[in-house]
């Protein structure tokens, strides 16, 4: 999750090791791991009916799901940045009682099965839920079965990736720059804006990328909490799942789009967000 | 990240526990170890869950402890799984369409039950739903099964017969998910099988759909050709079709198969 940050910290003093240092015995399992990760992708490519792909990809259901997935995943990142960055700041910089508990709570959605997350969201933000019944009564807002509900479900599972990455970045930062800014008369807000945020920008970027990727792929919490309706809550992964049961070719086409989008992001942002990966 | 090794280990342990706990639910009646010859795998429509669990127990005690492991899901999902080579011994579908999809992979199907549709609402019917017409009300949150799910297809047929247009808030992947959305109070109404309302327990109740608007679902069962335990698979199918099996299905609200 914070591989980029960790790698950068660990990587800079020692640098990459020479090939002679790798024990031969590691090569076999490592090779198997590469195969294990790559073969499913080959399977996907091999099964693709390339000739029908353009028609499959421009079908309304695919375009609708793609558009909705973009809206929801970007929305989830926005929610995560607005709420998660301040939380990361608090966790990294402020000593308060129960901080470890809060941190554990923050990471919980990463280890919990997303479907369970969806059930928990229903019991909290559903029409009869702890908060949801109040929202319904006071404002007439109900979240399940709405696009806002899908964004909420995605943010619930994806926000921890941003918080953890951002917190690690803040902890690894050299605080002397902030001290210097303070000595030079900058206020706390100015220091945060002009010194701290630019310095943690790479971690923030990496966190946003991970958060976005997780949100884009979210399935369990979304289908449980937000349901499945084309154009409203049926994001790409849900569309893949539903199509798989009836129309394998459409499911493969949709999967290919998700794969291409993920790869494109990874490649485009690699140098910027994972600078040490190629060092 | 500044996690100590112990803390990381603790997180991994918690994750493993959670995963293990989840895995345990999948095997309805098998005791954990699977893949032995003393076991059959039955892929059955979600609406058959309660009745088949009961039948499975009876089968196990009548057949020297042969375990029955169920895979309950929407019939369309099960048909796809069988097409992709999932290790099923018996397939029981909620419609003939999905049985036809795997025609080449199964033995001769036989109808073993039928079912009718009902509107499922919350206990006490707080929205006062009286029939399919009421489901067109835009203030009512209606959940249906997806059009590819047998229950969703039948619901669509019933709505067409009643000349009602419904804009569902969600199209669920199987009929049980429709019931759970209503019993959780998230949806006001749904269209499901009569047997699902019965199995839904005290949280939901059914509103009858008149005969001229209702649709009869026919359930076919067949053994899977790739099964390595043909005789046991056939024994399960025979049991479902036997008078005892039919009695169990009746107790869970299923109707006898249509006489052809």
Image (cartoon, rainbow, N blue to C red):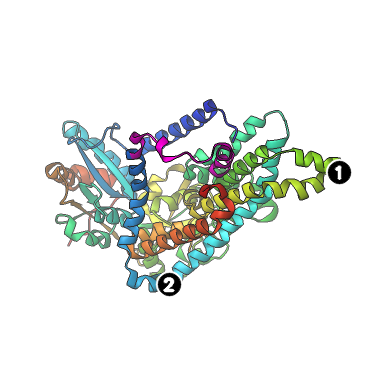
Q: Are marks 1 and 2 on the same chain?
A: yes
Residue located at (60% from left, 47% from top): A125
Q: Is residue B73 visible?
A: yes
Task: State yes or no: residue B257 in magenta.
Answer: no
Asked whether, in this view, residue B64 is left or right of residue B84, the answer is: left
Q: Is residue A246 left or right of residue B187?
A: left
Residue A219 at x, y percent in the picture: 47, 52
Provide residue B28's location: percent of width, then percent of height: 32, 38
Considering the whole magenta stretch, tell me its main secondary structure: helix
Residue A199 placement, left or right of A44: right
Q: Quadrant of residue A124?
A: top right
What kind of element bears circle 1?
A: loop
Is residue A132 visible from the viewing direction of this image? no
Q: Which residue is mark 2?
A: A59
User: Where is residue B187 shown, x and y percent of the image?
Assistant: 52, 54
The number of callouts visible is 2
* Residue under label 1: A184
Instruction: Please tell me whether residue B56 is drawn above or below residue B119 in the rendered image.
Output: above
Judging from the image, mark 2 belongs to the subunit labelled A
């Amino acid at each position: 999750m914070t591989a980029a940050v960790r790698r950068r910290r660990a990587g800079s003093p020692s640098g990459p090791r020479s090939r002679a240092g790798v024990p031969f015995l590691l090569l076999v399992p490592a090779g198997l791991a590469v195969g294990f990760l790559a073969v499913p992708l080959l399977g996907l490519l091999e099964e693709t009916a390339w000739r029908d792909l353009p028609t499959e990809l421009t079908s309304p259901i695919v375009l609708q799901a793609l558009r909705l997935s973009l809206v929801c995943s970007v929305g989830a990142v926005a929610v995560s940045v607005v709420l998660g960055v301040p939380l990361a700041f608090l966790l990294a910089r402020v000593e308060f009682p129960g901080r470890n508990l809060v941190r554990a709570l923050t990471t919980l959605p990463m280890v919990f099965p997303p479907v369970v997350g969806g059930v928990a969201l229903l019991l909290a933000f559903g029409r009869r839920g702890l908060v949801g019944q109040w929202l319904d009564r006071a404002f007439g807002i109900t979240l399940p079965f709405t696009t806002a509900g899908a964004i909420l479900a995605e943010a619930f599972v994806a926000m921890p990736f941003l918080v953890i990455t951002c917190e690690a970045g803040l902890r690894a930062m050299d605080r002397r720059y902030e001290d210097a800014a303070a000595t030079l008369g900058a206020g706390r807000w100015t220091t945060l804006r002009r010194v701290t945020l630019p310095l943690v920008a790479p971690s923030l970027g990496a966190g946003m990328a991970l958060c976005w990727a997780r949100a884009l792929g979210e399935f369990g919490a979304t289908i449980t909490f937000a349901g499945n309706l084309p154009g409203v809550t049926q994001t790409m992964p849900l569309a893949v799942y539903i199509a798989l049961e009836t129309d394998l070719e459409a499911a493969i086409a949709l999967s290919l789009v998700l794969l291409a989008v993920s790869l494109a992001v990874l490649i485009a942002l690699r140098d910027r967000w994972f600078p040490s990966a190629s060092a | 990240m500044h996690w100590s090794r112990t803390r990381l280990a603790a997180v991994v342990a918690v994750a493993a526990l959670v995963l293990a706990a989840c895995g345990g639910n999948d095997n309805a009646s098998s005791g954990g170890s699977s893949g032995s010859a003393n076991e059959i795998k039955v892929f059955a429509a979600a609406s058959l869950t309660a009745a088949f669990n009961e039948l499975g127990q009876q089968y196990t005690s009548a057949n020297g402890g042969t375990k029955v492991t169920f895979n309950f899901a929407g019939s369309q999902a099960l048909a796809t799984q069988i097409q992709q080579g999932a290790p099923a011994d018996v397939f029981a579908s909620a419609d003939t369409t999905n049985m036809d999809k795997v025609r080449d992979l199964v033995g001769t199907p036989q109808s073993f039950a039928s079912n009718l549709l009902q509107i499922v609402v919350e206990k006490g019917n707080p929205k006062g739903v009286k029939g399919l017409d009421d489901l067109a009300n835009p203030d009512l949150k209606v959940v249906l099964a997806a059009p590819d799910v047998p229950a969703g297809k039948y619901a669509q047929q019933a709505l067409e017969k009643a000349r009602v247009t419904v804009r569902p808030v969600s199209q669920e992947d199987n009929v049980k998910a429709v019931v759970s959305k209503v019993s959780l109070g998230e949806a006001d109404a749904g269209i499901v099988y009569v047997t699902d309302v019965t199995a839904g327990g005290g949280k939901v109740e059914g509103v009858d759909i008149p005969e001229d608007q209702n649709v009869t679902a026919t359930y076919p069962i067949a053994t899977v050709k790739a099964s390595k335990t043909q005789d046991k698979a056939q024994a399960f199918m025979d049991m479902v079709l036997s008078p005892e099996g039919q009695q169990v299905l009746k107790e869970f609200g299923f109707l006898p198969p249509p006489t052809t």
